Amino acid sequence: MPKRPPEDPTDAFTEAYEAYADAIFRHCYFRVFNRDRAKELMQETFMKTWEYLSKGEKVDNIRAFLYKVANNLVIDEIRKKKEVSLDTLMETGYEPGFDGSSEMKSKVDQWKVLSTFHKIEKSYREVLIMRHVDGLSPSEIAEVTGESPNVISVRLHRGLQQLRTHLKNG
Amino acid sequence: MDDAVELFFGIARSVALTPGERSEVFQALAAAFPGTSRGTVRNGQDVRLTAQMSLTDKNFTGKARTAIHLTAHEKSAVFQSLQNFMKSHPYAGDTMERTEESWSFFDVLRNFRLAPVLASVLVLVLGLGGTASYAAESALPGDALYPVKIYVNEGVGSSLAFSAEAKARLEARRAERRLAEAEELAMETRLTEKSAVYLMQRIEQHSAKAKQHLEELQVEGNAEVAVEIEEEMHTTLLANDSVLQKVAHSRKEGRREIAHLIKGVRELAKGKSPNDGTVVIAAAFSDETGNGDADTFSMKSELAMDAGASSSLSAPALMMDHKAEKSIDKAKSRLETVRLFIGQKPGNHDPQTPVESQLKIEAAESALVEAGVQLKAGSPDEANRLRKESLQNAEEAKLFKKVEKKLGEQRPVVEIAQKTADALWNQSKKKIQEQRSFLDAAKASGSVSVEALAAAELTLIQAQAKLDDAKVKLDAALYDESIVLSRDAARMIVGLKASLIVDQNRQKNENKKKEKNEDPERSEMVPDAAVPVDDLDKVKNDVNGILP
């Protein structure tokens, strides 16, 4: 049998980056609550993905793969640093400095969203992010997290309830 | 899914990387994995990053990475910054000045005079990579990681700032950080004279650089943003003044060093208005279309009032409203942001929120509401003043949140000396004001010689300067020194009225002599109404009153 040269994954990788860099970053951001850290985790995710690809491994669904890698990295990250209070994060991650964005309003909104997420229970938060921010289907979420679709559905339902409560209370 | 939830996720989805960040990460990936270098280079910024990265070691491929690491770009920045740091911090000396000479990394290694601390910093930074950069954020002068904070964290920022606006904001941010470091040191009672002097110098340097970039902005025609940044810097200075005072009042040590900082901050704050006024006026006059902006116009009219000139700017007042409303809206957003930062929901009284912060944010809120009212009532200048007051209170609320945790809720004991110092300062202030009024009246009457007026003016200026110093000491809780300075200020002006009256009488006599020579028939002149001679008694009483 003739030897097939390994397909160059460069283009596929570049395309994946273009398509999903923001999404992966966003995902990490709402889970670790720190923009810089989220950037690093996103970079890490793509690096690991490249390593995997450059070894000649095949990936059917690059998107799911990226989320799987990111999810594992985030879990490791959270385990390493015990859940920090939003206070501490504000001192190291976010501070309302005068950074001159004319999109001040959107920054305020984003911050509100961040702090609301922080109030929601971790296991609900994760699935809410994956479903409604990342746009993954419940079965995709199940694949990424390794939980059963049933568990995911329950968490989604309860997560939305918590979210509604927090939004109502302002 | 209902609207609120839909809106919520919509906002969440709007979080994104900036194009710069995106290409920055991509270039980092490209350097580590040559295979990806076929990605598109978007702009000059990317080219620069790539070039810098080609200098670094490319041997990271193939290694499984679970540890945190620096990007290629950050690593080269670290090497360069460590070189600079080690060059300017040789083991034998202990200066904090930077030198511009470059040193090869291998020279450093060969130099066994380096303190062990530096070697461990090296290990720390190279070993922990990104974590060190992260941890360095809270470093203070004297900490091992402080150079990483300055040269790496802040250094990376400067390599990414290209426009005059970005550079101005960067320098302003750096000045802010130095101030915050000084406050932190003061709170930990680690603030030495050397570090206070050093940090104040750095603050002045960064502020000066920021101003330069702001001038560039003005020249480019972007006056609106320049005024905005200017205002932010001013607000920061005033807010930090308050915080420094608070720290001084709750710590027995370090007050003199804090006084040095307060003095420097006040001088910087003063130094701002006159200069910027000139630049802004120039910019506004060069604007052919006449489309100035609200802030420009209101600053001009403020200055016009100061200079006593008549303002020909009342016509564009109607145009101002739109921009003025915009800046009030911006202030509203800022208040919102600070509220969230201090952890308070509007209308709630969260027991977790420090009291002082709460009070400040409430004050900011009411000032802004009043500003809106004033604007509608047709007083844009008053509205602008209130808006600035609001922003300052908001900034103080934010700073106090950080500070109050460290200082605790203790109500500082009002020291007895404080009351005396306070009273004496106010007394001297009143006296100087009286003398100022007297001098103005004398000037207006035209019955005093120019030389006497000039001499009196000079004395008053000197006395005022001394009084300002007394205030600095007072605010830094150095009560004894404040008392001495207040007394000195009052003493300086003791003879002022008398000297003016004496001169006035002399002028009168000379005039009388002249007229007698010209016209012998004329009767005695009626004395000028401006300054009655009875005042001499009042002067005597004043003199007795000042000296305790």
Image: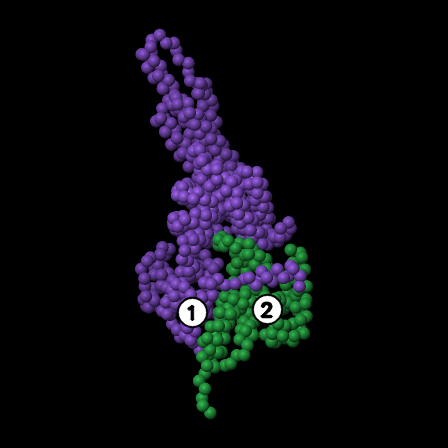
Q: Residue furthest bottom?
A: A1
Is residue A22 at least partly visible in the picture? yes
Residue B505: give x, y in percent of width and height. Answer: 38, 19
Q: Which residue is mark 1?
A: B40
Residue B254: give x, y in percent of width and height. Answer: 47, 48
**On the rendered image, what quadrant is the N terminus of chain B found in?**
bottom right
Mark 1 neighbour class, 10 Å CA radius: few under 14, some 14 to 19, many 20 or more: few
The quarter of the picture where residue B33 lies is bottom left
Q: Is residue B201 above or below residue B64?
A: above
Label the purple chain with its letter: B
- Asked whether, in this view, residue B57 is left or right of residue B397, the answer is left
Q: Is residue B95 above or below residue A73?
A: above
Q: For the residue marked with disc 1, what is the amino acid?
A: Thr
Q: Is residue B342 above or below residue B50?
A: above
Residue B440: give x, y in percent of width and height. Answer: 43, 27
Front residue of A101/B294: it is: B294
Colour chain A is painted in: green
Q: Chain of mark 1?
A: B
Q: Which residue is mark 2?
A: A135
Coloring scheme used: by chain
Q: Chain of mark 2?
A: A
Front residue of B120/B53: it is: B53
Both marks 2 and 1 on one chain:
no
CB under 8 Å between discs 2 and 1:
no
